Image (cartoon, rainbow, N blue to C red):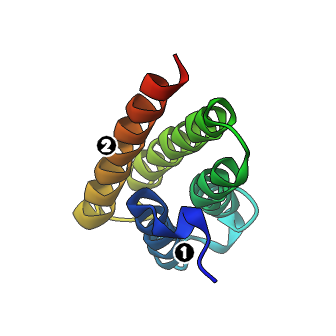
C-alpha cells in the first residue's frame, strides 16, 4: 500500500537525492567518515523523512512545520556540498545541484499551497 507521501514528487526527488549523496560521499577521505560524510548523509536522509512524517500528521499546520524542517535540512546539505567541493573531496556535480534546486522549488510550491489552506 502506497502512503500519501510516496505520491509526492518532492518526496520522490528527495529519495533520489539521498542516493546521489551516498554515491558522492563514498570516495571521501576515511577521516571524514564520522564528520562530513556522516553529516551530509544525515542531512540528505532528513529531507524525505520529514516530508513523510509531516504528510502522516493529521493537519496541514503540522505538515507545514515538517516541510520547513525538510527545507532547512536541504539548505544544510547544500552548504555541506559546497564545502566538500571547496575541500576538493568532490567535483562540482551539476545534476545533484539541479536536483537540490528542483526540491527547493517543489518544497516552496507545496508550502505555499498548504499556507493558503491554513489561513
Tell me the quarter of the image containing the N terminus: bottom right
Residue linked to disc 1:
22
Q: Residue at x 61, y 35 (%)?
A: 60
User: 83 and 20: which one is in front?
Assistant: 20
User: 61 and 65: which one is in front?
Assistant: 61
Q: Residue at x 59, y 52 (%)?
A: 51
Give the distance between the C-alpha atoms of the residues marked 1 and 2, in whole angstroms: 22 Å
Q: Is residue 74 above or below residue 92?
A: above
Residue linked to disc 2:
105
Q: If you read the primary sequence from the N terminus, does the residue marked by circle 1 or circle 2 appear first?
A: 1
Please provide percent x and percent y for residue 48: 58, 59
Q: Residues within 10 Å of mark 1 (few under 14, many from 20)?
A: some
- Local SS, label 1: helix
The number of discs equals 2
Residue 69 found in image quarter? top right
- Local SS, label 2: helix
User: 115 and 25: which one is in front?
Assistant: 115
Label annotation for residue 65: none
Please provide percent x and percent y for residue 87: 45, 52
- Residue lying furthest bottom: 1
Using residue 87 as the reference point, say whether residue 40 is left or right of it.
right
Q: Is residue 69 above or below residue 115?
A: below
Using residue 118 as the reference point, say whether residue 89 is left or right of it.
left
Amino acid at each position: 500500500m502506497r502512503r500519501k507521501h510516496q505520491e509526492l514528487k518532492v518526496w520522490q526527488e528527495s529519495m533520489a537525492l539521498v542516493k546521489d549523496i551516498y554515491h558522492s560521499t563514498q570516495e571521501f577521505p576515511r577521516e571524514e567518515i564520522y564528520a562530513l560524510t556522516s553529516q551530509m548523509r544525515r542531512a540528505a536522509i532528513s529531507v524525505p523523512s520529514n516530508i513523510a512524517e509531516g504528510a502522516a500528521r493529521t493537519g496541514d499546520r503540522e505538515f507545514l512545520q515538517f516541510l520547513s524542517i525538510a527545507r532547512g535540512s536541504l539548505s544544510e546539505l547544500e552548504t555541506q556540498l559546497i564545502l566538500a567541493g571547496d575541500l576538493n573531496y568532490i567535483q562540482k556535480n551539476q545534476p545533484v545541484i539541479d536536483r537540490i534546486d528542483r526540491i527547493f522549488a517543489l518544497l516552496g510550491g507545496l508550502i505555499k499551497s498548504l499556507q493558503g489552506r491554513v489561513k
